[in-house]
Image (cartoon, rainbow, N blue to C red):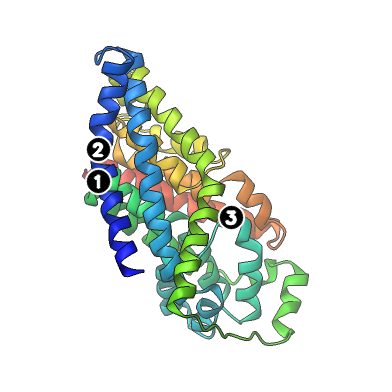
Amino acid sequence: MIVLGVLGLGGWFFIYNQLLPFSHFFAYTLLGLSPDGHLGGAVQFFVYDAPKVMLLLTLVVFVIGMLRTFFTPERTRKFLAGKRESTGNVLAALLGIVTPFCSCSAIPLFLGFVQAGVPLGVTLSFLIAAPMVNEIALILLYGLLGWKVAALYLFSGLTIAIVCGWVIGKMNMESHIEDWVQEMRNGDPLVFDQKLTWSDRVQVGSEAVVDILGKVWIYVIAGITVGAVIHGYVPENLMASLMGKDSWWSVPAAVLMGIPMYSNAAGTVPVVEALLGKGAALGTVLAFMMSVIALSLPEMVILRKVLKPKLIATYILVVGGGILFTGYFFNLVI
């Protein structure tokens, strides 16, 4: 198994290093497109980024799938149960990075946290951090845009999750959780037990690759297609004027644009890459990405099943305010 793993990793690196020359050969030699033309740039971007993102996803999801067997949702709930607000907010946000989560699992995770006695603010810190600052987003940002952008995204995302969860927790809004959810606090205690061998963990990693790539590939391809169009056809001065530092309204506009969309981190990163390449400001682009992931309309509809309207509105205002602050802050200092 170790030999197969080493050979597989070696093959992965070999293919990854050939993607850029292959994309140039395919677009400019095989298809005969001009490197200076709009179509040539768009095709080269797509042919390079599509397999690159999928390769990164395959490796990352497999490794993280194995690591996640040590950080199951059940163990996370057990670890956070009984933690006081400030400490719990920090721990919840950090655990959100490595714990399986997507918008479709928001309700069962929320219910599990409530049943385990985790405070509302701590729970929301986890629910904000898990989809927005997940490991796939961070590693894709690192692979496509470098460690500085990935580190900035990590820092800002965790700060938003910790502060927003703490603020909502201090507002004492537990009464705005739906009544049927409140009743679960008096339900049967949760049982936390899971024993896996290394073979089991490898199998979990392999199954995660099939499961997650099967769910996200369409969003990845859609995001790369949008990124390719932006890369090939959108003039740099246009993006700089619309999403640049000098446009004060660009950050709130980017947040409002992101809310109706439904995608995940893997699908938004290629768009972020293209926007930054065309002169968009980093803070504006990060605000757009965060709003797509953390404030999407479909996720709000899902959370409405467990949260009353006032708490939903508070969540949107507090998290949205944190995203706006992040966008303006990075546009100011970078």
Disc assigned to residue 25: none
Q: Amino acid at mark 2?
A: Gln
Residue name at image x 43 percent, y 66 percent: 98
Q: Is residue 323 something one can see in this rendering?
A: yes
| Mark 1 or mark 3, whichever is nearer to me | 1
Q: Amino acid at mark 3?
A: Ser
Disc assigned to residue 103: 3
Count neighbours of disc 1 (C-alpha within 10 A) and say few if under 14, some if 14 to 19, many if 20 or more: few
- Image height of 13 relative to 226, above or below: below
Q: CA distance from mark 1 to mark 2?
A: 7 Å
Q: Nearer the viewer, residue 119 or 269?
A: 269
How many labels sit on residues?
3
Q: CA distance from mark 2 to mark 3?
A: 35 Å
Q: Give how far across and how far down residue 226 sits, in percent.
A: 44, 28
Residue identified by numbered label 1: 14
| Mark 2 or mark 3, whichever is nearer to me | 2
Q: Quadrant of residue 26?
A: top left
Residue identified by numbered label 2: 18
